[in-house]
Amino acid sequence: MEWRYDLRVATPRDAEAVSELLRASYPRLMRSAYDEEVLAPALELMTQAKPSLLGSGTYYLAELANGLLVGCGGWTPERPVTKSVEPGLGHVRHFAVHPDWTRRGIGRALLEACARTARAAGVTAFECYSSLNAEKFYRALGFVRIREMDIELKPPVVLPAVLMRRNLHEE
C-alpha cells in the first residue's frame, strides 16, 4: 500500500480536518496512560483545532495524496496557557499522528520541520508539555525530562504531563 505523505503549512481552512485527526488520535493513544475520569473531560478540550495555531504559519500537516491528514503539529514562541515569551525558546504544540499511521516517521518529520523553521527564527531550544504516553516519543527525538507537571486545561480539568526540553543545535 502506498503511504507517502507531504508536509505543508496548516491554514484556518484545515480546522475540521485537524479536529478529526485529533479525535481519532488522542482517545486511542492516550488511553494507555490516563484513567477514564481524567481523560474524558480533557479530551473534550484537547480534540479541537486551535485557530491561533492554524493561522500561525508554524503549524504543519502530514497529508496523503487523497487529502487525508495523518499527522499534525507545530511550534510557537508563546508558552501554552500563559502566553509568555522567553527569547530563544520555542514551544512544541498540539502534535498528533493518526493511530493507524504511527511508527512511520510522520511525527519525527513534523518535529524536524518545526525545528528547521524555529532555528531560522532564532530559537535555540524547544520545550513541550508532553502527555504521559508521548514522553517516549519525545525522548527518542532528543528531548529530556525536566519535571512532572499538571496542565490546567480549564478549571477544574487538569491533565498530568511532563515538561520536556530539547536543544536545537545543528546536528
Image: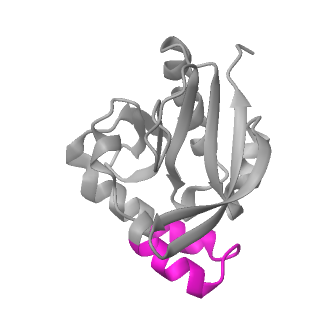
Image height of 3 relative to 17, above or below: above
Please say which color scheme the image uses.
one colour
Of residues 149 and 41, the one drawn nearer to the viewer in this rendering: 149
**Residue 166 or residue 158, whichever sits in front:** 158
Image quadrant for the C terminus? top right
Q: Which residues are magenta?
A: 24-44
Quick check: can you spot residue 3? no
x and y percentages locating residue 118 in the rendered image: 52, 22
**Image position of 127 (left or right of 118):** right
Q: Is residue 149 left or right of residue 11?
A: right
Residue 50 is left or right of residue 102, and the answer is left
* Residue 165 drawn above or below residue 95: above
Report x, y in % for residue 101.
56, 56
**Residue visible at 70% across and 63% down?**
132
* Residue plotted at (64% across, 53% down): 130
Residue 38 painted magenta: yes
Residue 126 appears at what percent x and percent y?
A: 62, 32
Can residue 106 be seen in this snapshot? yes
Residue at figure coordinates x 67%, y 21% from the top left: 168
Toward the viewer: 108 or 92? 92
Q: Is residue 31 magenta?
A: yes
The overriding secondary structure of the stretch rendered in magenta is helix
Q: Where's residue 29, x and y in %?
A: 61, 68
Which residue sits at x=77%, y=34%?
A: 142
Tell me if residue 137 comes above or below residue 45 in the rendering: above
**Residue at the extreme left:** 13
Establish if 90 lies above or below 65.
above
The number of numbered badges drawn on the structure is: 0
Q: Quadrant of residue 119?
A: top right
